[in-house]
Image (cartoon, helix red, strand yellow):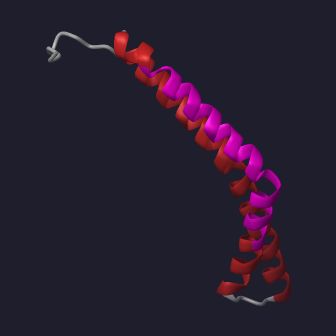
Amino acid sequence: MARTDNENPMTTQQVIDIGTQAMIVCAKLAGPFLAVVLAVGVAIGLLQSVTQLQEQTLTFVPKLIGSAIIIAVSGNWMLATLVSFSRELMAGVPNFLNG
């Protein structure tokens, strides 16, 4: 059965809600990475300014190690959060299509 232009199964509010939930999940998942990388960057920057060692590549390895630690510590929680959001979104598809 072909859909006509008048039939709109999803409302604007539903689209906004899905987008809002997606942004919240993205912020939750990116938050730990950003916090650790920012903290390591500030600490290394302070150390570089105190020692007057201005090497650009010096901050890369500590940030990489910090990111690896974040994945090891909270990777399970991040994956569970993403899977939960995906399941809720997939479970809501029939409701979105029926209006």
Membership of 62 in magenta stretch = no
Left or right, residue 56 beside residue 96: right
Please tell me in which quadrant of the rendered image residue 95 appears. top left
Membership of 92 in magenta stretch = yes
Q: Residue at x 79, y 75 (%)?
A: 44
Please tell me whether residue 6 is drawn above or below residue 39 in the rendered image.
above
Q: Residue at x 73, y 65 (%)?
A: 67
Q: Residue at x 44, y 22 (%)?
A: 93
Left or right, residue 95 beside residue 31: left
Which range is magenta? 65-93
Tell me the chief SS of the magenta region.
Answer: helix
Q: Residue at x 74, y 59 (%)?
A: 71
- Residue 19 percent coordinates (x, y): 48, 30
Quarter in which the N terminus is drawn: top left
Left or right, residue 19 beside residue 35: left
- Residue 27 percent coordinates (x, y): 63, 42
Please tell me in which quadrant of the rendered image residue 77 appears. top right
Please tell me whether residue 88 is drawn above or below residue 6 in the rendered image.
below
